[in-house]
Amino acid sequence: MENGTKGKLTVSSSLQVEQPLAPSKLWKIIVVASIAAGVQFGWALQLSLLTPYVQLLGIPHRFASFIWLCGPISGMIVQPVVGYYSDNCSSRFGRRRPFIAAGAALVTIAVFLIGFAADLGHASGDPLGIGSKPRAIAVFVVGFWILDVANNMLQGPCRALLADLSGGKSGRMRTANAFFSFFMAVGNILGYAAGSYSHLFKVFPFSKTKACDMYCANLKSCFFIAIFLLLSLTTIALTLVRENELPEKEEQEIDEKLAGAGKSKVPFFGEIFGALKDLPRPMWILLLVTCLNWIAWFPFFLYDTDWMAKEVFGGKVGDARLYDLGVRYGALGLLLQSVVLGFMSLGVEFLGKKIGGAKRLWGILNFVLAICLAMTILVTKMAEKSRQHDATGTLMGPTPGVKIGALLLFAVLGIPLAVTFSIPFALASIFSSNAGSGQGLSLGVLNLAIVVPQMLVSLVGGPWDDLFGGGNLPGFVVGAVAAAASGVLALTLLPSPPADAKPAVAMGGFH
């Protein structure tokens, strides 16, 4: 273990020294935050198109959620590991930048495997037409695992680099995370717009093959654009923004401390368990509120477009008419949600000051999330009540009022989503900075509160929905309850972040 370019020390004996430099210029923070647009473009495609895609590959709804287990599992392991080693990286390219570059390269490989899963499966012996395609599923799962590993390699170091560039200033950290959330919204808008356009494959005519129909070809074409966007933004950021280096004298002092501490070697997971054991109370409460918040969000993230296609439009998997139309309307809803997310992200800091603080804003908007998730029941019942058939007996799509209600629900959810994407990470950076802790490992610990509920939902979500008839509403109801509980805890137990202050030099304690 060795000092990084930001002057932070993390050693296995729980000794930690934090020597933050002056905050960097705002344009550097914005350039680094823009990487989120490339990352989120790919995530938007996952959230809007991949659940229907895996069902088209032959995986039933009750098992589709298990595919998403790879994300939480990789996030639970990869992001803390990457955060830990990026805190202690001694590369001449910097602490965070090598991991960001490696993550972008892995995303390229993963997207190729996912996009060409049907083609590779058919080339290996999968049949054409409707039915299970085991080889394509295997390729898809491998690509999906790599993609989630790569995204975690990107997001953790990106947020840690933003905290580094903020120089330990809590106001600058909140601003940096607000810009990160804003660019996530930009990526979402671009991704959902691409996903909702059904003729994008015509731009890449080679994407449509015998094994890959129009829907599959559109997904493949979207991923081509995702690769270009991510690699472009990452290259620009890593070229223009250099990580600051410590003065030589301070480097020597830290090297001496590391040489003494290095005699006691503790494995990485010892650091994680030590970090959890010595977490200060504010971080424990933050983890609890974040955990409940993600139990609320993840069922909707998994099945939002599937809910629109099945419950609202009345379609069935494989139905090239209503189901596909519902998926595209779901992507449109997510596009509207992202527009709201973008505007709200820029207003989080202002609203937080007006309402009385970040924790109060988060708590109030968790109740908004709970109400919106509960409203999916009302929209579904309205859709079922207004079902109509044409003269031939063919089921028609929902009425304009139902469509507007569903799209409005998607849009309003962009308001609490902006807070979910910014405030928890800003609070973790502020709490850890004031405790003299490593940003990479601190954000990795916070990530545990995100991936553990994702694992829980992925494991029980499908069987839970199947227990009540196979729809998506049971998971949404659980999410509404969890959101309300998260709001109560945020308002009553979560401490307000301290004002800007010089971070402490911590001896032991939270890593």
Image (cartoon, rainbow, N blue to C red):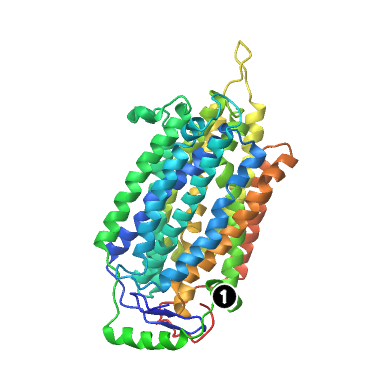
Callout 1 crowding tier (Cα within 10 Å): few <14, some 14–19, many ≥20: few
- Give whichever of 329, 234 is nearer the camera: 234
Q: Which residue is drawn at the image coordinates 51% and 44% (left, top)?
A: 47
Rendered position, 360 above or below 457: below
Rendered position, 106 above or below 197: below
Q: How many numbered dots are placed on residues in this image?
A: 1
Residue 328 located left or right of residue 225: right
> Outermost residue toward the front?
124
Q: Which residue is drawn at the image coordinates 29% and 73% (left, top)?
A: 244
Could you tell me if residue 57 is visible in this image? yes
Rendered position, 232 above or below 324: below
Could you tell me if residue 411 is visible in this image? no
Residue 446 located left or right of residue 469: left
Q: Which residue is drawn at the image coordinates 39% and 70% (left, top)?
A: 171
Image position, residue 195 (x, y; %) = 44, 36
> Dot 1 corresponds to which residue?
270
Q: Secondary structure at mark 1?
A: helix
**What kind of residue is marked 1?**
Gly
Image position, residue 110 (x, y; %) = 44, 46
- Give whichever of 215, 292 is nearer the camera: 215
Image position, residue 178 (x, y; %) = 40, 60
Image position, residue 485 (x, y; %) = 65, 60
> Outermost residue toward the left?
240
> Outermost residue toward the top?
391
